[in-house]
Image (cartoon, grey):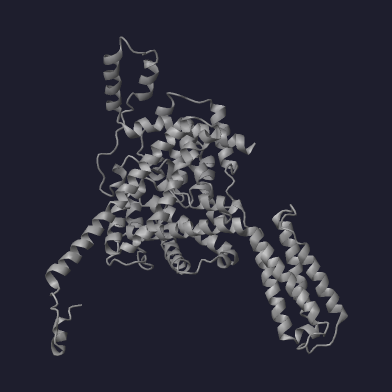
Amino acid sequence: SIEGRNITDTCSIKYNMHLFHPLSSIQGPVRERIIIAYFRLFGRDGDISRIDVICKLCKSTNISPPASTSTTSFSSQRSHKYPMDEDKLFSRYPLPVDLIRNVVGCLISDDIYQQSSAFPNIDHRSIRLSRQASMLYVILFFDPIVLREESAKLREIVDKYFHDNWVIHIYAGMTADLSLEWNRFPAARSALNNVLQVDNVKKMHINNAKLIGQCMAELRAYLTMGILTDSFVLDNRHDLLNTLRRCNIAVRWRVLHRRTTNAKYYSIVCATMEKVSTDPKLEGDFAVNDTHVVSLILLTSQLEMQLKDSFRDLIQKKESIWISCRTQACDMMTDLAEYFKGDQTLARVSRHDGLIQWFGSMAGEIRDLAYESGDHFTVTGRKIQLCVQALEEVEQYDLVDRDVQVKAFLQDARGMLLHMARAVGINEDICDDIRWISDMSYGVESMKSYVQIIHSRISKDPSNVSLLQGFFLKLSSSLDGPVERLKQLNSPEAARITGYYSSQLVAFVRNVLEIVPVSVFAIMVQMSDIIERRLQRLPLKVQGDKLIAYAQL
């Protein structure tokens, strides 16, 4: 089953990450000294029955993190993984070869997370399968023969998962640069070099820069005050979701690939601008700096927050919207039936029994459209579509086509029916899709490098503080991943692990918000300086001809 494959793959990557984390957090010689110090302190009285297993796990691999880099400071952060001879590390605790082969085959051939509704476009396939790509990267170290010799399988993997990206998110904010990680494996290096030509990297960078420019324009349009009403959201649901997809795809690619440690690619992706501007440079080297990335993240998170609130409200009000629109559409049909009787005082139309009967039966059909019928919303939507089609066809009659008032009634009735169809299509699946689309677990560590830029924006324009709520809510999506399976098992450890990751997020939020009191007091100092030093005190009485001398603002 899909769920069984999902659980198996998740267990495999959790197992791998338990081997990764000690190496990425503490260097080998330090780990060895800690174990020896513990053994000397508790060797007689403590439980050291498993000391051999612990020594096997923690002993040094003789691979140390780079002390410095000439291209970027990101690689010095613990959240960006460096090559650490993983095949030898994983050989200490090997998994059955058949299991590894089956897991790899499942990850290559299946979409185990089934996110096609969140990213339906074929061009977004690598984003939809990004979690599987991370699992493949880690699990392949248990079978290094594939990385060294099986060129055909590696080409299939690269073409499916890494044809437009090479810096990936592994787990809990940790990233890896495949151009360096796979450089020591001949088959993997050969497959990756097919797509990581300099011209291809420039093309990826330019396409992303253009996408950022497009997204910034769309976000500014949608975030204009008063635009995102319930009616607008219902009528433009697909366009809004497509904008969210484009924005998150643009952010993800840019945030991850600005962490590349390959000097050749870093100079392309992180090209700087001579002049600081609010939008990326869409010509020449197509420079996109950190300020543009922060602006896109803040505006995207704001749109996500507003759309989530709108869809939640629409789900709650869906039944009332349905009933209201159905009642209005039914009343319109009844009014039209009465109109064609010719009995109304101001009605200059002859009686038409056929139209009277037709509009009366249409009113009955609309009245029979039931929200509680239990039909799937596509079935109900099809019934509504048939009613709309019938209203369009009735306009072809000469008696109806010549009457502007009747045509206006028919147009309003079609609008009500379409509104009903859109309302009935709103369900919890849309909220789940937005959750998948807006996931930012890959950036929880990367965002720490953008704190100073956020502080600078708030210092220049304090109104940017209003954008932080959506930004923090977007980052909170990272809290679900590490404990997803524990919550399903009702494990008591879920609360403790959630508390740990929550404390990390709270520390980041405090770090970002510390600029707020600083800015407030800076403004108060400026106000005090203006009041005490620059403004002249006004006397109780001022002569009219000298009034201009006291004008100071």
How far from the left and from the top, in percent, is residue 27? 29, 31
Residue 537 located left or right of residue 387: left
What is the residue that sits farthest to the right in this orientation? Answer: 353
**In percent of the image, x 54 and y 41: which residue is there?**
152
Q: Is residue 99 left or right of residue 165?
A: right
Instruction: Name the residue: 54% across, 40% down.
Output: 153
Residue 512, placed above or below residue 16: below
Q: Is residue 358 visible?
A: yes
Query: Percent from the top left, x then y, of residue 545?
Result: 14, 90
| Label total for image | 0
| Quadrant holding the C terminus | bottom left
Q: Classify residue 313 by image quadrant.
A: bottom right
Q: Position of residue 274 (x, y in %)?
A: 27, 66
Q: Is residue 464 above or below residue 55?
A: below
Q: Where is residue 222 shown, x and y percent of the image?
A: 48, 67
Residue 148 appears in the rendering: no
The answer to whether residue 537 is above or below residue 44 is below
Of 22 and 93, nearer the camera is 22
User: 349 or 284, which lies in front?
Assistant: 349
Q: Residue at x 42, y 55 (%)?
A: 470
Residue at the farthest front position: 540
In the picture, the quarter occupied by the N terminus is top right
Q: Nearer the viewer, residue 440 or 369?
A: 369
Along the line of sight, the residue nearer the viewer: 364 or 54: 364
- In the drawing, does residue 409 fall left or right of residue 547? right
